[in-house]
């Protein structure tokens, strides 16, 4: 597993993003959505700076979502982006647990089976699962990039 860091200048007041536990709604998913979208946009910029081509963002299927789908050469990369906004929230990579991995994997299978323009070889398309994490309270913002963070080793679901 390779770990790459990128520094991005980010002021805590940009885009009205709160960087600490300023509200009791911190665990409210609708409240966190704009923050997640913001970090995913920065993550997309990071991947582009590393030579990746963004194929899709926020691809959803049956309760699962792929934050970013990118191409690294001939390999299709399904990228999960996780962030924490204060030092009380722990390691963001730990949030990609077995249940989350399974949802990502099932959604990736659906993408491979249905998106023939991006995956003309279907399930034979070379692909991998990466995780990008950020501690948004740290300045400058840094991404940790975990390539091949996990493998999809289950039986291919019926789509």
Image (tube, rainbow, N blue to C red):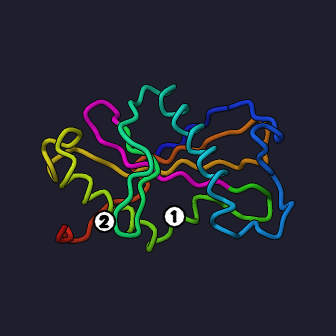
Graded by Cα atoms within 10 Å as few (under 14), some (14 to 19) or many (20 or more), the crowding at tag 1 reads some
In x, y percent, where is residue 147? 44, 46
Label 2 vs 1, first from the N-terminus: 1
At horizontal 75% and vertical 66% (from top left) the residue drawn is 26
Question: In this orientation, which residue lies closer to the viewer: 125 or 4?
Answer: 125
In x, y percent, where is residue 81? 54, 51
In x, y percent, where is residue 95? 57, 65
At horizontal 35% and vertical 44% (from top left) the residue drawn is 77
Quadrant occupied by the C terminus: bottom left
Q: Image check: 72 left or right of 34?
A: left
Q: Which residue is mark 1?
A: 96
Q: Which residues are magenta?
A: 71-83
Q: Main secondary structure of the magenta part?
A: strand
Q: Nearer the viewer, mark 2 or mark 1?
A: 2
At horizontal 39% and vertical 68% (from top left) the residue drawn is 103
Q: Which residue is mark 2?
A: 106
Secondary structure type for disc 2: helix
Secondary structure type for disc 1: loop
Query: Badges 2 and 1: C-beta atoms under 8 Å apart?
Result: no
Gap between marks 2 and 1, in whole Å? 14 Å
């Amino acid at each position: 597993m390779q770990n790459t860091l990128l520094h991005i200048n980010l002021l805590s007041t940009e885009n009205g993003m709160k960087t600490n536990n300023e509200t009791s709604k911190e665990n409210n998913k609708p409240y966190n959505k704009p923050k997640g979208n913001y970090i995913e946009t920065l993550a997309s910029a990071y991947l582009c700076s590393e030579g990746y081509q963004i194929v899709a963002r926020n691809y959803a299927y049956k309760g699962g979502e792929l934050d970013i789908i990118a191409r690294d050469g001939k390999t299709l990369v399904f990228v999960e982006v996780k962030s924490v906004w204060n030092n009380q929230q722990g390691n963001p990579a730990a949030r990609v647990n077995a249940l989350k991995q399974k949802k990502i994997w099932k959604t990736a299978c659906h993408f491979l089976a249905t998106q023939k323009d991006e995956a003309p070889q279907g399930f034979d398309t070379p692909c991998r699962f990466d995780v990008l994490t950020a501690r948004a309270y740290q300045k400058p913002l840094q991404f940790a990039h975990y390539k091949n963070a996990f493998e999809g080793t289950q039986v291919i679901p019926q789509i």
